[in-house]
Image: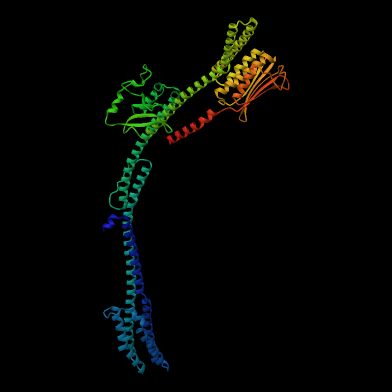
Amino acid sequence: MKLLQRSLVARIIASLLAISGMAFVSISLTMMMSASTHGDAAAINVAGSLRMNAYQIMGEVQRAQYVPDDTSEARLAELMARFDQRLNGPTLQHSVPDSARHERRRQLDKLQAYWQTTLRPTLLEASASDAPDLDALQAMMTAMVDDIDTLVLQLEQSTEAKVQLLGMMQILFLTLIAIVVLIALYDVRHNLVVPLRQLMVLAREAAQRNFDHRSKLRGSDELALLGDTFNKMSAELSASYAALEEKVSRKEQELERSNQALRVMHDAGRSLYGGGNDLCSSAAPMLRELEKLLDIGPIRLSLNDPFDQREMLVLETHSPTRPEYCRDQECHACLIDPRPLELMASDQAQCLLLPISVGDTLLGTLEVWYHQETLNDNTHRLLTMLADQLATAVYLQRRIEEQQQVTLINERTIIARELHDSLAQSLSYLKMQVARLERMQQKDASRDTQAAVFDELRSGLNSAYRQLRELLTTFRLKLDGPGLQSALRQTVDEFTQRLGATVELDYDVPPYLLNPNEEIHVLQIIREALANTHKHAQAHWAAVTVRFADAQLLVRIEDDGIGLEDDSSPPMHYGLVIIRDRANTLNGELSIANRPTGGTSVELVFTPLTARLIQQQPATSATHSSGTETLR
């Protein structure tokens, strides 16, 4: 019973079983009633035939009396045997109950006894007598027929009673089935249909993100339990959805802060990479904005000395005192708003140390103070990116400073070599000539002898002065326009004015191919060749070609002047000697010859020494690889 109260499925199954059981009982009883009426119609027919048979016997007796013949007794015997057979046959015996108290059994027994004891002997006597008493026989036969009618009526009533009982049973079971069906429908409507509608409404509201709707099911069946489960699920979904919305809102805020922080870092990148050694003016504003966005701080930046690896505090966003190694006493970037320093003294403050490193080289450390709840994964990643950005800026600045020092040393070396190879040699020659002149004066040499020395001194001074002017022009061109192409354009413009003719320039060389020493030698060779063209060639046109192809640099200076006297052996002028010396310094091949169309062609071919680029390339690759590993 408790199971039916707790389970809707059990009630539905019980209703189906009850309906099926009553239908089965009804069908079984119908079959039994049908089986019980089997033979009743035959018994009624046999009983009815007994009445007809009795009339036939009476008619045969009367005919034998009035119209006697030889076959009358035989026919009468046959009719009596037939009557006896039908009366005592199995059809009537099976159609009446075996109980002696039953009315039909008593009626049948009465008929059989009356036939055997009274009517049959009387008929036998009447058939043997010549003058039977027909009236008495007629009365006996009428009594017999009345008893037969009574038996037939009893058989008909019994059959009708069975049919009426069968109908009543059908009506009863149909009524019971209808009642069970109505009860089941009521139960299904109130305990299945209505709860299902409520659950569907609850599911539809949940699909529309309305988790406040609740089912009002009461009870202990399956749908009530399901309604309670839906209510709990809606409550949990409401809480979970609210938590997710809050989490999404926090994530959106974090992403917004991250985007703003990235925008600040991006905007500060130009000043950071171009700010030189002044990290206060380039990095300090960025760090303060990041502190406001990420709710962190203060931030300290310490760099290691590249020589003794001593750690030096170079920048602090909020500090009560100036850093020890501050170089600008007018700067107050670190002394702004020391209030956040209270965070460092609190118990909730924590410090995050991030390395400022490129590859395996540790350049310094970044010290970030923060609250535990303010540092999440996004903030940590942004601070790591900040440390990498600062490391790149510091590393590039140090590389730029080193490169500037190397460039300055190279330029000084070039100037010293140029002075040694040109002006210093001329001054040494003049010094020797002065010593020679002093010895001549001590020996009282003749004026003509001393005049030759004075001529040599004058020529040497002119040559030295010319070399000095060439050197000044060369280095002035180098300083005014960086790069060989700019210097060559100025040289071409200069000699165009000096020659009074067009000097063409064909320049096709990749940038940064030549080192400063090679650029100076190439420029000096071109200037010396153009100077010879101006002095000796009497040219109306000149051209300078500088091209790089097949890993070699081609330098060609041409003119349409008078050319050389001997193509196979050009004169050993002082300028040509300088050109040959510079070509040998470059390990190049120099050729000086007359052009087929007239004029002179000076051609130099050499392989540039790109050792500086080749040596820096592996270091740069290693730096990039290390940086990539750090980012990973």
Tell me residue 481's x, y (percent).
Answer: 55, 18
- Residue found at x 65% / y 6%: 448
Q: Position of residue 122 (x, y in %)?
A: 32, 90
Task: Say above or below: 83 vs 602.
Answer: below
Q: Nearer the viewer, residue 163 or 351?
A: 351
Q: Where's residue 513, x and y in %? A: 57, 26
Quadrant where the N terminus lies?
Answer: bottom left
Q: Is residue 359 left or right of residue 413?
A: left
Viewer-closest of 232 and 155? 232
**What is the residue that sits farthest to the right in this orientation?**
597
Residue 539 in view of the camera: no
The quarter of the rendered structure image containing the C terminus is: top left
Tell me which corner region of the image, top left, top right, bottom left or bottom right, holds residue 531. Answer: top right
Residue 469 in the figure: left or right of residue 300: right
Mark yes or no: residue 207 visible. yes
Q: How many marks?
A: 0
Residue 182: name its quadrant. Answer: bottom left
Residue at 38 percent of width and 90 percent of height:
77
The picture quadrant where one finds residue 158 is bottom left
Relative to 23, does residue 620 appear above or below in the rendering? above
- Frontmost residue, 155 versus 550: 550
Horizontal and vertical percent for residue 135? 33, 88
In this view, the residue in front, 50 or 416, is 416
